Image: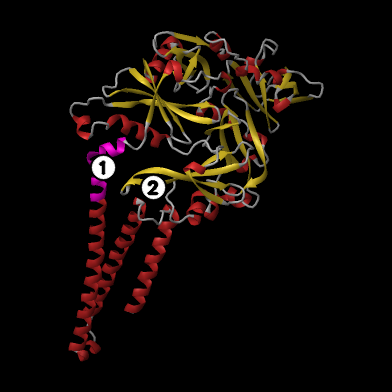
Amino acid sequence: MKKGLGFALTGLWVLLMLVSYWFYLPALNPLELGFWFFVLEGLALALVAQFLWGLVAAVSSAIPSQKAANLGRTRARDVTKQTIAYGRAFKLCLALIVGILLILGGASLFSSRVFRAKSYAGVIQVKEADFAKDFPETDVSKLALLDRASAEKIGDTYLGTIDKVSQFGISDAYRQITIGQQPYRVSPLEYKNFWKWMSNRKEGIGYYVKVNQTTGKAELVKLKEAMKYSDSEYLFRDTLRHLRLQHPTTIFGQPSFEVDDEGNPYYVATVYRPKFLLSSKDPVGAIILDAVTGKSKAYDLKDIPEWVDRVYSADNVISRVDDYYTYQNGFWNTVFSQSGVKKTTDSYNYIAIGSDIYLYTGITSATADSSNLGFILVNMRTRQVTNYKLASATETAAQASAEGEVQEKKYKATAPILTKLAGQAYYLVSLKDDAGLVKSYALVDAEDYQQVTVNNDIEKLIAAFTDADTSALTGASADQSATSDKQKQISGKVEQLASQIIAGTTVYYIQSNGQIYKIKASQETTDQLPFLKIGDHFTAQVGKDNNLDAFAVVSAD
C-alpha cells in the first residue's frame, strides 16, 4: 500500500509540474527568475507530498492488528526507519526552499540600484544634439496621424468583408510598424473562441488588417497561404508555446505581430539576458517566427533583418533613459541633493523616420514642472538614443492647451506627435469627441504652448506652417473620388452606419449585403448624406476599394 501511495504521489507531482509548465512556460535557464519560481513550486509540492506520506505512515502504524502485535520490535524498527527517512526528505526540501529564497533575495538586493546605481546609468549612451540644427524636418507624407484607437475603429469596419465573418474577429494588437517607409498599424485576424478554432484550425487564418496612419486608408490583406501560428491558437500552435518548445532555454518576451515589406506575416520575440545577476533583463537579440510555416530563427542584435521595426519595448527604453539621467551621480544623490537629476515625462509617442520607428519623449527636471529640457529620440530597432536640447512645454501641458482652445466642445486630446515644421518645434494633437472620433487637429508651439492653432482640415493646418507639399495628407483619397467607366452600379439598404474624420475629411462607412462601403464627404456628395440612417435605401457606383460615387438616397424607412 505504501509503495503504491509513493508511486501515486510521484505521478501526481510530475503531472502538476507538467501542467504548470504548459501554462507558464518558464525558460529552463538559471538566469531567468521565472525558472527559480518554477523550481520553488516543485519543492513546495514535494513538501506537501512528503507531509502526506508521513501522515499515512503515522496513521498506518497506529492501527492495531494481530500481525503487528506478533511482530513486536521488528515493526517498531520499520516505523522508526520510515519516520527518519520522511523527516530527512522533508527537511531537505524545506532547506532548499529557504536557501533559494535567501539567495534570490540577496541577489536582488545587491544587484539593485541602491548598490549599482552607476552601472544602471551606464547601460546606454546618449548622444547630445541641438534640436534646431540636428532634429530632422518632419516629412508630412509620413505623419502618423491616426493613433491606435482610431486605427482600430477603421480596421474593424472591414471585418464584414471577409468569408466566415462569424468565425473570426480582429486582434486588438494593431502594432505600429513601417512598410515601405510609410507608418502603418497591423493586426491579424483571430479565432473568436475555442469552438470557432476547432472548426477553422485546419484552414488557418487567411487575413490581416493594415491601416495607413497618414492617409487613414485601411486594407484587409488576403494571404497567399494562411497563418497556422498565432496568439489565438490553442495547444502547440500558440506562438508563445511553440517558440518555448523550440527554444526551451532561451529567455524571450511575448511574441508580437509584424509583417515584412512584402506583406508576409511574422511574430517577433525579443531575446533577453539579465544585466546584473538575475535582474534588469536587456535585449540581446530576437527570434523571428514565420506565422505560416512555424519555422523560427534566432538572431543577434546586429543581424536582425532591417524590416523588423520593434526589437526594444517602450518600457525597456523609458527605464534605461530614466536610469541614465537619474543615477549619473549615484543613488543617494537622488534622495538628498538631486543634483543633475532628470527624468522622462509621463507621455511618449512614436514617429516614423525613414524605414524605422522612433520613440520620443520629453526630458524634464526632477521637480517635474510643466517644462521640458529637451527631447529623447530612440530607434526602436537599435536603441540608439539622441537627446535634442530644446526648452519647451511638456506633452501634458500641450494637450491641456489644445483642449482649452475647444473647451466648449469638450474634446479630449490624444498623445501629441512631435513635429519640426520650417525649423520650428510643434506638437500635433488630435482632438476626439466622447465617441472616440477625431473631430479636429491642433498645432501647439512647443516653445510657447499658449500659441495654438486649430483646424478640422489637417492639410490646411499643416500648410499654414510649412512650404512643404502637404497633398499626401489627402492625396490618397483623390483617386477614390474619381468616377470610372468600369464602376459597377449597385443598390442596397443601410444595415450599419459609422463615420470617421480622416485628414480633416469625414468618411462614412456603410454596411450593406455583407459588404463595407466608404463615402468621402465633399461638396459633390448629396446633402442627404449627413442625415443617413439605418434602414435607408440607396444607389451608388462602386469604385476602387469599395468607395462609393454618385451616391443617392432613394427611399427611407
- What kind of element bears circle 1? loop
Identify the mark nearer the N-term, 1 or 2. Answer: 1
Q: Which secondary structure is most common in the magenta stretch?
A: helix
Amino acid carrying label 1: it is: Ser
Q: Which residue is mark 2?
A: 273
Q: Quadrant of residue 211?
A: top right
Q: Which residue is mark 1?
A: 112
At label 2, counting other C-alpha atoms closer than 10 Å, the crowd grade (few under 14, some 14-19, many 20 or more) is some
- What kind of element bears circle 2? strand
Distance from the alpha carbon under mark 1 to that under mark 2: 16 Å
Q: Residue 210 in the image: state x and y as whole percent.
A: 60, 33
The question of residue 112 being in magenta is answered with yes
Q: Residue at x 27, y 32 (%)?
A: 327
Q: How many marks?
A: 2
Q: From which residue to which does the magenta span run? A: 105-121
Amino acid carrying label 2: it is: Arg
At label 1, counting other C-alpha atoms closer than 10 Å, the crowd grade (few under 14, some 14-19, many 20 or more) is some
Residue in front for this viewpoint, 454 or 377: 377
The question of residue 170 being in magenta is answered with no
Residue that sits furthest to the right in the current view: 485
